Image (cartoon, coloured by chain):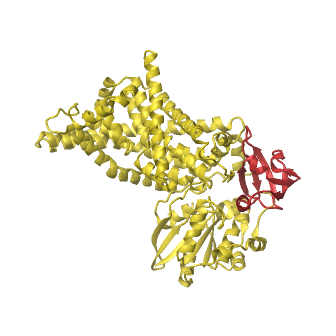
Chain colours: A red, B yellow
Amino acid sequence: MIPLHDLTPGDDATVAAIHADTALRSRLAALGIRIGQRVRLIRKGVLAGPLHVRLGTTDVILRRRQASQITVTR
Amino acid sequence: MKRIALVGMPNTGKSTLFNRVTGASARVGNWPGITVDLLATRILLGGDMVEVVDLPGIYDLHGFSEDERVVRRFIEHTSVDLVAIILNAAQIDRQLALALQLRELGLPCALLLNMADEARQLGISIDAAVMARELAMPVALLSAKHGHGCGEAMAMLTHELARAKPVAPDMLRVQLAADDRIDAAAEAVLSAAVDIPARLPAQITDRIDRVLLHPGLGLPLFFAVMLAVFQGVFWLGEPMQDALERGFDFIRAAALVPLFSGAPAWLRGFALDGVWAGVVTVAAFVPLIILFFLFMAVVEDSGYLSRAAFLTDALMAKLGLDGRSFVMMLMGFGCNVPAAMGTRIMRSRGLRLLTMLIIPVSLCSARLQVFLFLTAAIFSARAAPLVIFSLYVMSFVAALVTAVAFKGRFRNDEPFVLELPPYRFPTLRQIGLRAWHEVRHFLHRATKFIVGGVILIWLLTHLPAGAAAGGPDTFAGMLGRLFQPVLAPIGIDERLTVALIFGFVAKEVLIGAFAVIFGLEGQALATDLAGRMDWVQAYSFMLFTLIYTPCLSTIATLRAEAKSSAYATLSVAWSVLLAWLASFAFYQTARHLGY
């Protein structure tokens, strides 16, 4: 179990837990980030920039602060 | 009259479909939430007039963004006969939940799966008949961009509308609680009707992203692309502008001068040196502005702006903003008004207000006209592009200073989570609609502000009767003297003061004002201006024009979006102060250095 932002680009993982408030949780869910969903880290932005992840056919970018609220298992 | 509401997620081509169906030119944007106003049009469907309403793109019926609230409010308060749900067929696996949410409300629904061509390319096959049975609503596959399947989809909507009974759902909130049930239901429909390949074929988007989102090259490439866009606009636009000016000269010499030869001198002056010179000077820039918007439309619809948000977010976070603020500022390069409305996608009020505070300093196309005109008159052909470029840099600097000054006051607590759409290329039809929209927009502004402004300025520079035109005894001269204590230290003389005052209304009026104040147009006006102001004065004038406030429409938009007159006042006061300080610093430094 590691936070999403600790993956290295190219890694696949499964979303294990989401530690976010209701508003963020529902936004993440609407973009496909739900518990049990497979996720791949595509790239990390430079200078602590956002992460680029892929869920199925959807690409999502999110800040590391939000990524740290999502734990995944490899 | 029956009513159809279009509901769908952002980036599903909803606006494209709306445009295709209605022939209207709603703004099409590959940026979540760009359809900001509710667009409604009446069309003839199966022999009856039907109202079609394009609702903002949403991810979720019970989300928390402004757009999601707008859609909910609309469904709660408006009787709708049929909800046309538009989903992206290529992302059906996660978008289907929205259709189920709407169905749960008991609304009569029809499902349109757009971008069927993209889905097919990705190897996703969808059995529309099975899906229709599972969902208990009709389903049609189509591609709005290319027009495939649109006829069938319209026939389906017509058929459904004939059977549908309007529903005004009151118990929306209660019913929306059933989220888990919807997830399970979506799973069942997907496994029955959709076949998604386990591994998607290597996509072109991925390959482009590897270059454009490169850690080191990404940002430099982005600015190179934007620079190429601007260069392309001028390279293509300048010959068109020259041709237009020659055409106007010909009309004046061949038709207008003979027409007014018998008229009294004041009428001849009013018509030729006032209205005609003013309007023509502004109109000569129309081809450039259309090209500019066309190029921006291609960049915007391509999905590149979302990449810009990714690339700039780290920097924007330090300013209390996020990547979307940067994109809104770029959109402001076209026009500040839609950029300010585009901030509705932001949930945090602090972030929205801070973003709307920096948008007014983005160098919009109207200000660009003023700068192109002045740089062509005052600077050499080699220096002119550099001067324009430096003004774009100053626009960013002013935004940066504004954000730093106010980030403590407008706090941003919004998480940054955003969809990255695949790259798309707009069709010729989309581009054509956009160009027509811009021409119409210009004509609208022209009739509203430019003609009126130009006439007023002519009157101010020629009255009271007996005063020398444009001289110190006219009303304009008096106004100029009144402001001299403030404007003299930044190198702006009495005659240009009245132009600046009218520039407050709309920047296009500013160049029209030059023509009227000096009673000249085209090359003669440029030569005359070059004799009146040196480059330090010209640059100081442009700096002030860049920052001191965009136009009345933008201020009105800021007031409406923030729902606060105090906020709009703050924005204007800050802009004017910042403009004066910037010009003062530049002008006095340059003079002290001996320029």
Which residue is located at x 80 percent, y 47 percent? A5
Residue B41 x, y percent position in the rendering: 46, 68
Q: Position of residue B153 (x, y in %)?
A: 58, 72
Residue B139, image x and y in percent?
A: 64, 74
> Nearest the camera: A16 or B132?
A16
Considering only vertical position in the picture, is B454 above or below B192? above
Residue at position x 84%, y 52% in the image: A12
Rendered image quadrant of residue A23: bottom right
As displayed, is residue B585 above or below residue B396?
above
Q: Is residue B576 left or right of residue B475?
A: right
Observer-nearest of B421 and B115: B421
Q: Count how many numbered circles sit on residues in the image.
A: 0
* Horizontal relation, residue B273 to residue B2: left or right: left
Which quarter of the figure has residue B157? bottom right
Instruction: Provide residue B429's location: percent of width, then percent of height.
Output: 50, 57
The answer to whether residue A14 is left or right of residue B454 is: right
- Is B137 on the left-hand or right-hand side of B475? right
Does any portion of residue B427 appear in the rendered image? yes
Q: Nearer the viewer, residue B268 or B90?
A: B268
Q: Is residue B201 visible?
A: no
